Image (cartoon, rainbow, N blue to C red):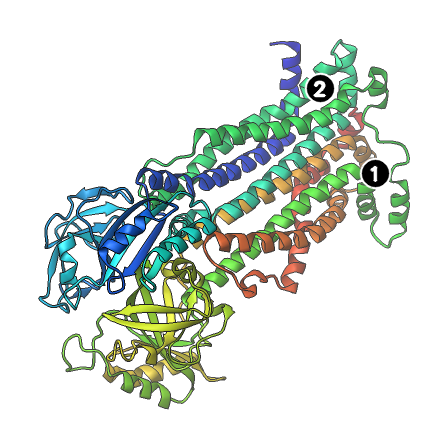
């Protein structure tokens, strides 16, 4: 081994704490960066590849068969700006049953073959529907396995279709496909009522491009023929939503990790230079050149950084496995993994940052004159911090505490590095606490768990004793029991129905309320809660999927009937990809006259004991066959649980790095002052006083760092949460973002002192245990 190699090995071995700090900081930064980078790529790459391979439709248009002929629709494919078109295909929305079990509605399209100039389908299992009586389902829909029969007892002739295969459309243009001749039998009138046209445009990279293409297509067909249309950009956004949700917060943690790596590495290497001036002088005296000294101190930082980067790549790839697995399921692909170029870029970037940071500090060591390094040793500049020591001595505090409070002023650069480490630690904790609180607010908005008591049973209800099996309770009797019971404050009933919307595939759930449900925990983003029949509120994703806005009208197809509602408000609700509609029960009276309330939500009056109220209500409801229950713990969504787990892991890593940054600084300071500690002990200072002095030396940096880190964490949270909401297709109201209370902020500010004290405990204990004679002999 060369002489320079022995110097590097000796430096790494002697400075174990600094080595650990550099390695852990780099590990955390690389882990977060790998996760963020891999998810960012996974959010766009697989969809774009599949869409290009299948020549996906840039626009999926639904057209009224009564307003345009097949020839007119076929001619629309020659419109300027249209590069290719497929169709017209007959389409219909149906609600199948599997035996006695109802299934969600399906948008069914009639196609002869899965191939075509636009939207070439990939057959994933089974075979294509080549004859009447067969149906192919969209892969991943979870409707029914191969061989299952889907029945339509409400249609003329009660047709029954056998599931013969599953296929995947990159643009998600339908829920199922049948032979073209089958479409007429799936409509109540016995003839095709709507067509689907699929278009690819010369330019479709932006929303403006797609709108321009849609306008051209609309102008090429008779007026009013286009009843709905869906852009491929909307499908792309929905497909990427789950994984894209992770990216802003992972990027935030990745940036914090990189900044802290720069800070910690710079502090540790600068401290190593500061405390090793005499050693540097000796190295130069025995023949080391300035460039060799610089390379030696850079290598002492790069060795643990390289180890941390390697472990960080391993951890990042392992943590990315479950997230990328979910992404593969969403896109219908397989074998998604972290791209090798991401690992290479992240590792190179992290090591590059460490190299530059270490070089800046090591350059100081290289340019020191040998005689100056040998003469100065590791004694701080004379007089530095004396004014602070004199003022601290006048305070009515124990002498050990006064000496500790004055210490940061003797090494202002090192104290500033400690402040910065604590600042980022407090910033991380504040951001993490805010993120968790905001996610809980979103969870509360999803579950709508404001009601004190709920009454209702999902699925077939037992009914009153002696009644017919499967018969439901009398809704009027349930409502009467609730209304007449003392302690009932306010309540509303709810019922659900499945529907489809023109221009949007898949099922839309309508929740119809009887009574005022505005207090039920529904967080409004914009507009207002509905106040009259034919008014509705919908989530943000519904507006995006249907191309509508607050104030627009939308037509819902419920059990074969068309129901038109006006959207008056935008509500926060991430369930079912936001394909939800909330309206008054009277809105569905014509389409579903027999839709009873299946759930009741009750707020008890002030002073009422909920447990006693539930017991009395159950006594009244027992003859009706339903049960009331108090509010239960909210069900945590899988994505939110993953986010909370990742937040906890990354936060602990960052706080550990912040604490180790303080520890590294205190270790350097303690090593530098070991003779002073010996003098203090010789003059009678006890081990407890030594510990108190060391701990109070970091109290002021901890307090300042906490005071600066908390508002920085609040600002970071206010920036990242809206970005996360946007990634998930959600607009978050202020109540979800402004979650930090004043008492909580004060406690988080004091947390900076806690981080600093915890980081200083190990060197404080070492200083207290050091023997006086050993300390006095140390040079």
Q: Nearer the viewer, mark 2 or mark 1?
A: 2
> Toward which corner of the image does residue 327 lie, by quadrant?
top left
**First in sequence: mark 2 vs mark 1:** 2
Q: CA distance from mark 2 to mark 1?
A: 26 Å
Residue pointed to by mark 1: 410
> Picture coordinates of residue 732 (x, y %)?
52, 61
Q: Give left or right: position of 679 versus 73.
A: right
Residue pointed to by mark 2: 294
> Picture coordinates of residue 642 (x, y %)?
43, 50
Q: Is residue 424 above or below residue 487?
A: above
At horizontal 39% and vertical 46% (from top left) the residue drawn is 81
> Picture coordinates of residue 470 (x, y %)?
17, 74
Q: Residue furthest left?
A: 157
Q: Of 663 and 156, which appears nearest the observer?
A: 156
At horizontal 66% and vertical 27% (from top left) the residue drawn is 356
Q: Is residue 24 visible?
A: yes
Determine crowd level at label 2: few under 14, some 14-19, many 20+ residues with C-alpha closer than 10 A: many
- Asked if disc 2 and disc 1 are in contact, CB closer than 8 Å, the reply is no
């Amino acid at each position: 081994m060369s002489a320079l190699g022995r110097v590097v090995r000796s430096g790494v071995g002697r400075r174990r704490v600094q080595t650990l700090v550099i390695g852990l900081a780099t590990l955390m930064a690389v882990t977060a960066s790998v996760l963020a980078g891999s998810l960012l790529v996974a959010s766009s790459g697989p969809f774009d590849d599949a869409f290009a391979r299948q020549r996906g439709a840039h626009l999926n248009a639904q057209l009224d068969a009564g307003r345009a002929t097949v020839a007119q629709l076929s001619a629309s494919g020659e419109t300027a700006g249209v590069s290719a078109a497929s169709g017209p295909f007959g389409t219909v929305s149906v609600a199948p049953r599997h035996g006695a079990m109802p299934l969600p509605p399906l948008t069914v399209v009639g196609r002869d073959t899965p191939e075509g100039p636009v939207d070439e389908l990939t057959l994933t299992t089974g075979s294509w529907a080549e004859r009447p009586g067969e149906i192919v389902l969209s892969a991943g829909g979870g409707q029914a396995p191969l061989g299952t029969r889907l029945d339509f007892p409400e249609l003329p002739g009660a047709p029954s279709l056998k599931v013969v295969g599953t296929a995947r459309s990159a643009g998600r243009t339908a829920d199922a496909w049948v032979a073209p001749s089958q479409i007429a039998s799936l409509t109540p009138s016995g003839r095709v009522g709507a067509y689907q046209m699929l278009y690819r445009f010369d330019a479709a990279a932006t929303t403006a491009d797609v709108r321009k293409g849609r306008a051209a297509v609309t102008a090429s067909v008779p007026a009013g023929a286009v009843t709905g249309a869906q852009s491929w950009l909307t499908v792309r956004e929905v497909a990427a939503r789950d994984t894209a949700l992770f990216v802003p917060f992972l990027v935030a943690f990745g940036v914090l990790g990189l900044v802290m790596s720069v800070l910690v590495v710079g502090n540790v290497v600068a401290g190593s230079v500061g405390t090793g001036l005499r050693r540097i002088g000796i190295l130069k005296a025995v023949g080391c050149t300035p460039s060799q000294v610089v390379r030696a101190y850079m290598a002492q930082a790069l060795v643990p950084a390289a180890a941390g980067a390697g472990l960080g790549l391993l951890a990042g790839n392992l943590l990315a496995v479950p997230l990328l697995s979910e992404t593969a399921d969403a896109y219908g692909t397989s074998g998604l993994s972290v791209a090798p170029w991401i690992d290479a870029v992240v590792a190179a970037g992290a090591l590059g940052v460490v190299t530059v940071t270490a070089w800046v500090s090591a350059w100081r060591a290289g340019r020191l004159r040998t005689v100056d390094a040998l003469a100065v040793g590791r004694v701080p500049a004379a007089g530095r911090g004396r004014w602070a020591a004199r003022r601290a001595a006048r305070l009515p505090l124990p002498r050990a505490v006064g000496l500790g409070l004055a210490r940061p002023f003797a090494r202002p650069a090192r104290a500033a590095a400690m402040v910065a480490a604590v600042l980022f630690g407090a910033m991380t904790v504040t951001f993490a606490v805010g993120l968790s609180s905001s996610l809980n607010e979103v969870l509360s908005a999803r579950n709508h768990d404001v009601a004190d008591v709920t009454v209702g049973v999902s699925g077939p209800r037992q009914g009153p004793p002696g009644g017919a099996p499967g018969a439901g309770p009398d809704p009027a009797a349930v409502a009467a029991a609730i209304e007449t019971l003392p302690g009932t404050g306010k309540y509303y009933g709810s019922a659900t129905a499945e529907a489809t919307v023109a221009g949007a595939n898949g099922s839309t759930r309508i929740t119809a309320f009887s009574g005022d449900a505005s207090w039920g925990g529904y967080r409004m983003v914009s507009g207002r809660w509905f106040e009259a029949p034919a008014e509705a509120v919908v989530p943000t994703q519904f507006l995006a999927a249907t191309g509508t806005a607050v104030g627009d009208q939308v037509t819902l197809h419920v059990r074969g009937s068309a129901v038109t509602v006006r959207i008056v408000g935008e509500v926060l609700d991430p369930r079912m990809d936001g394909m939800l509609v909330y309206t008054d029960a009277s809105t569905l009276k014509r389409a579903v006259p027999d839709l009873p309330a299946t759930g009741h939500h009750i707020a008890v009056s002030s002073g009422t004991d909920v447990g006693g109220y539930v017991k009395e209500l159950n006594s009244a409801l027992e003859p009706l066959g339903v049960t009331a229950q108090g509010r239960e713990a909210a069900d945590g969504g899988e994505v939110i649980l993953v986010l909370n787990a990742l937040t906890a892991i990354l936060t602990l890593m960052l706080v550990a790095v912040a604490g180790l940054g303080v520890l590294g600084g205190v270790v350097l300071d303690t090593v530098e002052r070991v003779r002073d500690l010996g003098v203090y002990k010789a003059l009678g200072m006890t081990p407890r006083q030594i510990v108190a002095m060391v701990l109070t030396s970091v109290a002021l940096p901890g307090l300042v760092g906490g005071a600066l880190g908390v508002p920085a964490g609040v600002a970071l949270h206010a920036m990242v949460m809206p970005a996360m909401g946007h990634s998930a297709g959600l607009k978050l109201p202020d109540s979800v973002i402004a979650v930090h209370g004043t008492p909580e902020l004060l406690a988080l500010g004091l947390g900076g002192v806690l981080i600093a004290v915890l980081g200083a405990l190990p060197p404080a204990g070492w200083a207290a245990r050091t023997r006086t004679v050993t300390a006095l002999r140390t040079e």
